[in-house]
Image (spheres, helix red, strand yellow):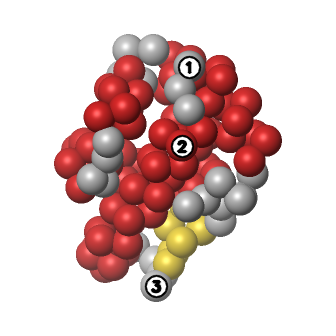
Amino acid sequence: MLLNNQPQKIERLAKKAGTSMEVLDEIMVAANRVWSEIGDDYLAVCEGPTIRRSEVIEAVLDASRLETMGNLSSEALTFIKATYADTAAHKVLDTVMKIAFPWNRYGR
């Protein structure tokens, strides 16, 4: 559970997106779980010892990895799918991913 990280910000984001804090927290936990599964392999093929946070987020979201590997509830899946068509929801997801992955660089 990552809600302790920035609860007021997550609450504002949930209201803005029309979802719950629990759904956003579930997505953050799932994103970290997906990165834990793919991170070593992903880093092994990247140039250099570290990659930017944006690359981590892209790797987690690319190819529907979050949806297929994240073990998400139907509510969280509905929110993720809404981000494909809804710009405001996509911006919320982007902010949530930045909270889930707080460091500027990630490496081995």
Mark 2 and mark 3: Cα distance apart in space: 30 Å
Q: Nearer the viewer, mark 3 or mark 1?
A: 1
Element on which disc 1 rests:
loop
> Where does label 2 land, which residue?
22
Q: Residue at x 38, y 65 (%)?
A: 33
Q: Looking at the image, can residue 19 be seen? A: yes
Q: Which mark is residue 108?
A: 3
Q: Is residue 71 above or below residue 81?
A: below
Identify which amino acid the numbered label 1 is placed on.
Gly
Element on which disc 2 rests:
helix
Query: Residue 63 versus residue 67: which sits nearer the camera?
Result: 67
In percent of width and height, residue 98 lies at 61, 49
Mark 1 and mark 2: Cα distance apart in space: 12 Å
> Is the residue marked by circle 1 packed among few (<14), some (14-19), or many (20+) residues within 10 Å?
few
Q: Residue at x 65, y 65 (%)?
A: 103
Residue 91 location, quadrant:
top right
Element on which disc 3 rests:
loop
> Is the residue marked by circle 3 packed among few (<14), some (14-19), or many (20+) residues within 10 Å?
few
- Number of numbered discs visible in the structure rendering: 3
Q: Which mark is residue 18?
A: 1
Using residue 89 as the reference point, say whether residue 102 is left or right of it: right
Identify which amino acid the numbered label 3 is placed on.
Arg
Answer with mark 3 or mark 1, whichever residue precedes in sequence.
1
Using residue 65 as the reference point, say whether residue 10 is left or right of it: right
Mark 3 and mark 1: Cα distance apart in space: 37 Å
